[in-house]
Amino acid sequence: MLSPDRAFSICGGVAAVSWFGLAVSLFVPDNLRAPIWAGTALVVPALVGLAYAVFLAQGLRARTGGGFGSIAAVRRLFTDDAALAAGWLHYIAFDLFAGTWIANAGLDADMSPLLILPCLLLTFFIGPVGLVAFLALRFLVAPRLGLAT
């Protein structure tokens, strides 16, 4: 059985490589982009999601008195390493999926990869802030400056 520490390390490494591939995909021809995005939007999030489900189940069985009903309950839940790993894997899977969506939506709108890349970096480091930055850039700034369709 994979320990929470080992899953954390493996999934973090796979995610880092995936994010690098996602950033590179902004600058490659369309035919090379599709297999990268298949990995970053489907394969990696699905595999990390499976690990998430296993560790979440272990964490919920740990009888920490934790749960999702209050901040105190979440704090108690995350005192278990399996639950904590599940929380981190949740971020890894969804942030990578969101990053792929940002790359796809930005390129579909004819935005420069140089405008999309900072949004991907923000999404990698601080998830929702990167998504908000992309949405603001895509729908408020870029159209007014003629930088997107």
Image (tube, rainbow, N blue to C red):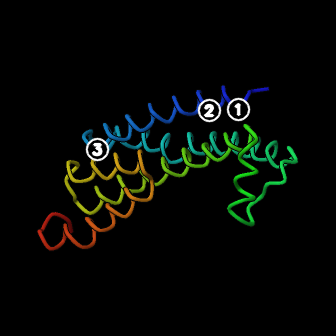
Question: Looking at the picture, which amino acid does disc 3 mark?
Answer: Leu
Q: Measured from the top left, where is residue 35 in percent x and y?
A: 44, 39
Of 18 and 118, the residue lying toward us: 118
Question: Looking at the picture, which amino acid does disc 2 mark?
Answer: Phe
Of 127 and 32, the residue lying toward us: 127
Question: Looking at the picture, which amino acid does disc 1 mark?
Answer: Pro
Q: Quadrant of the N terminus?
A: top right
Numbered disc 2: secondary structure? helix
User: Around disc 2, counting alpha carbons within 10 Å, would you say few (fewer than 14), some (14 to 19), or many (20 or more)?
Assistant: many
Asked if residue 132 is positioned above or below residue 42 in the image, the reply reads below
| Tag of residue 4 | 1
Q: Is residue 131 left or right of residue 113?
A: right
Q: Earlier in the sequence, mark 3 or mark 2?
A: 2
Name which quarter of the figure residue 125 lies in: top left
- Please give the residue where the numbered disc 2 appears in the rendered image: 8
Q: At 14% from the left edge and 74% from the top edge, which residue is drawn?
A: 144
Q: Earlier in the sequence, mark 3 or mark 1?
A: 1
- In 3D space, how far apart are the residues under numbered discs 3 and 1 (Cα atoms)? 33 Å
Name which quarter of the figure residue 135 lies in: bottom left
- Please give the residue where the numbered disc 3 appears in the rendered image: 26
In front of the other: label 3 or label 1? 1
